[in-house]
Image (tube, grey):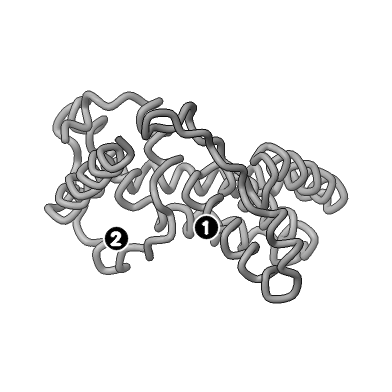
Amino acid sequence: MDWGSVTAEDLMDALREVDWSSPPRPVSEFFSRFTLPRSYAKWNSRLKCNLYYYRTNYFIMIIFILGLGFLRRPLAIVAAALTALTIAFLNDSFAGTFSEKVTRTVRQFSPHLAAKMRPPLTPVIRGRPSAKRAINICGRPRWVFVLIFSTASFFLWFASCGLLIVLWAFAIGLLATVLHASFRTPNLKARLNTFREEFRAVWRNYSEL
């Protein structure tokens, strides 16, 4: 895959649709080899490749840096957790997995309520869905949960007076992410993983026909 031809919009779409349940890469691999990119094109391609391949590691690193800034503000930790959950809901795979696990847990106590939490069926015409399947969480549109959790996290940020801290911590986390993605040399495993993800995407689209 030529990462130089991948736009920022394509990268964001890939990060939104990819499965985030995969475990993070080993620490020994994460801090293995660093080199200076030889040109802007090499740096651009390396940055996108590493952001996609080490996405789980970067997410954990940012959460860890945010946690260090909130040691003296427990309310801000809750706000950070809600903010992280709000961002995670924007990922299709996480939203679907979260909804399935919650519905499965509720089914053990109330099957009737769990039946109402099922996503609506998409009409099928000539073997194909008539429209792109909307992402629902517990039977409700995704934007409802995003709005609720983002509003709750905003009020918690305001109550904890930790908004300035989170801005500094988040900026440091993003800076560390960009620096690592810029200087970490992509290895063969990263390239093979990219080809595997591409094959899965093509096979998924083929199976829907």
The residue at the point 84 percent across, 45 percent down is 155
Residue 199 x, y percent position in the rendering: 20, 44
Q: Residues within 10 Å of mark 2 (few under 14, many from 20)?
A: some
Question: Mark 1 sits on what residue?
Answer: 97
Name the residue at the bottom extreme. Answer: 108
Examine the rendered structure and indicate whether residue 72 appears above or below residue 156: below
Q: Secondary structure at mark 2?
A: helix
Residue 127 x, y percent position in the rendering: 37, 34
Q: Is residue 10 left or right of residue 44?
A: right
Residue 96 x, y percent position in the rendering: 53, 52
**Label 1 vs label 2, nearer the camera:** 1
Q: Residues within 10 Å of mark 1 (few under 14, many from 20)?
A: some
Whole-angstrom CA distance, mark 1 to mark 2, is: 27 Å
Tally the numbered discs: 2
| Amino acid type, callout 2 | Phe
Whether residue 68 is visible here, answered yes or no, is yes
Examine the rendered structure and indicate whether residue 2 appears above or below residue 23: above
Which label's residue is closer to the chain start, 1 or 2? 2
Question: Mark 2 sits on what residue?
Answer: 30
Q: Secondary structure at mark 1?
A: helix
Name the residue at the front extreme. Answer: 126
The residue at the point 46 percent across, 42 percent down is 175
Quarter that holds the C terminus: top left
The residue at the point 49 percent across, 44 percent down is 92
| Amino acid type, callout 1 | Thr
Taking depth in this image into account, of 135 and 1 the one nearest to the observer is: 135
Q: Is residue 203 left or right of residue 98?
A: left
The quadrant holding residue 143 is: top right
